Amino acid sequence: MDAAHIRNFSIIAHIDHGKTTLSDRLLHRTGTIATRDMKEQLLDAMDLEKERGITIKAHPVTMLYTARDGEVYELNLIDTPGHVDFAYEVSRSLTACEGALLIIDAAQGVEAQTVANVHLAMKLNLEVIPVINKIDLPHADIPQTLQQLEDIIAIPKELAVLASAKEGIGIEDILEAVVKRVPAPKATGAPSLQALVFDSYFDTYKGVVSHVRVFNGELRAGMMVKLLHSGKTVEIKEVGSFNPKPYVREKLQLGETGYITANIKSPAEVKMGDTITDARHPSPELPGFKEIHPMVFSGIYPINTSDYEHLKVNLSKLQLNDSAFVYQSESSVALGFGFRCGFLGLLHLEIVQERLRREYGMDIITTYPSVVYKVTFTDGTVKEIDNPAFMPAVNYILKIEEPMVEAFVICPNENIGDMMALLSEKRGSAEHTETLDARRVMITSKLPLNEILIDFHDRIKSMTRGYGSMDYEEIGYQEADMVKLDMLVNMEPVDAFSCLVHRSKAESRGRALAAKLKEVIPSQQFSVAIQAAIGGKIIARETVSAMRKDVTAKCYGGDISRKRKLLEKQKEGKKKMKMFGSVNIPQEAFIEVLKA
């Protein structure tokens, strides 16, 4: 199809504002999916996506639509994730588009993630079409939502399309708005083919299948192309598009999106955001590609050590589907061989764990998540450390800097006091508050990434009874008084339990870990001390009492000195045992503590 009749757009929104339902409706209305094949969450392929009602992967689909002017248009839609952890998926998808549908829930109004996604789209100069969704709900407040659209996002309310994806209201208007307002793709003016790889997955029969958007020239089977990032030259075996299942096409022209397969067998050879060009007359690279840096690190170990190779293979398959996930092998005294993995955030970590368990049937254990610290040594060198095991002794450290984030928290007015208390508990500072409407405020706050890792999001939700929302972006590093907390069992440090914490929180963390360890370490023949230490200073202690044999049982009657003599002898034996005895911490104990 000629470029003038092609429209590339993506759908962006806060989590749970109805993106996937709307994409289902668009597929149905354009006749891409027959009524008999319609089912809920059509583009969400994973069980996890369906269960949680979230989109994890971006899904491309090509639709043909006959507009009111009688012309047939090819609409290429990319359904994107809504959660902050998958912002990279969103940015890649937006790079392949000229426009974006911004979905806002009429009952909930503008949320934190809505604002973040709009900034992302505007940075890429996309045409943003606001859609006020769920207008059929009894508690939908349309005038209020339109006002927020103007006040918070600065988009005139006249541009908004009112719709209800569930009831099928306004679907025609949305498609017409896409045709009229989203600009047609234009050639970049490069001498030959330029196509952007915005996603890929692994197919057992075809090898690596890459999702591409053609910016210049055309792609057809049999062409020799070059991947600029990896420098590899390959022959294209097949080109096609999705509707939403893949189907083969003769060629992909300027402005079209689809997939290609070539003789690429290794996931590592295709970089996300790479440019594909003609092997004989290469064109320059397309702009907008950035390497993604993980924010949260955690160790993943197989529960059964013989599964190590199996886990390695499965991680490489996962990495192909999810380019933001990185891993490298490491070993731990307690857990054996495993991998140090990097994630974009906690939901990302949770999803990867779940996929390993479900899709690949792996039994795994995950260590406590940590972030990347910058450590400046006394000799002036700076090193990035994400694992407490690599932290040097205190006397070699000049300063430690931790990653900071700017968090935008939207909450109801009555919860503002609780919110401020939570932020100060998490070592955050509220920069400013902004009243969004009669019911809600937005608090902009700076706080350490380390503090929002575990329960921050959950606590916002429970505090505001589900009405609060949060989004964050990284803003660099700041010096902090971080210390390495070691756990000693019978005077021996246990690597798997050590962590980096702020000095003000070290004692409470140490007490909690010691108490948990006391529950899970089995009794020995001698008493075992469990201590939390910073450097050489013990800050918390628990004792696992010894199993005791009643040595005075055979001694009835007679002088008390006979009993005392037996007890003293037992005491000496225990003392000797303690000097030579070692405590074996069972695997279950590690798993229990790391779960906690």
Image (cartoon, rainbow, N blue to C red):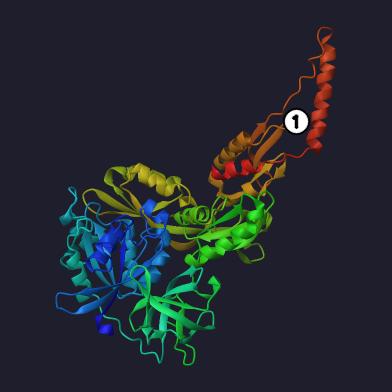
From what the image shows, is residue 403 above or below residue 564? Answer: below
Q: Residue 355: x and y, percent?
A: 49, 56
Assess disc 1: are there few (<14), some (14-19) or many (≥20) residues with their C-alpha within 10 Å of its C-alpha.
Answer: some
Front residue of 46/401: it is: 46
Residue 328 lies in what quarter of the image?
bottom right
Q: Residue at x 39, y 90 (%)?
A: 190
Q: Secondary structure at mark 1?
A: loop
Residue 490 lies in what quarter of the image?
top right
**Residue receiving disc 1:** 525
Front residue of 289/11: it is: 11
Judge whether residue 153 can be spotted in this image: no
In the rendered structure, the answer to whether residue 69 lies left or right of residue 534 reads left
Q: Amino acid at mark 1?
A: Gln
* Quadrant of the snapshot with the N terminus: bottom left
From what the image shows, is residue 472 above or below residue 234? Answer: above
Judge whether residue 540 can be spotted in this image: yes
Front residue of 435/452: it is: 452
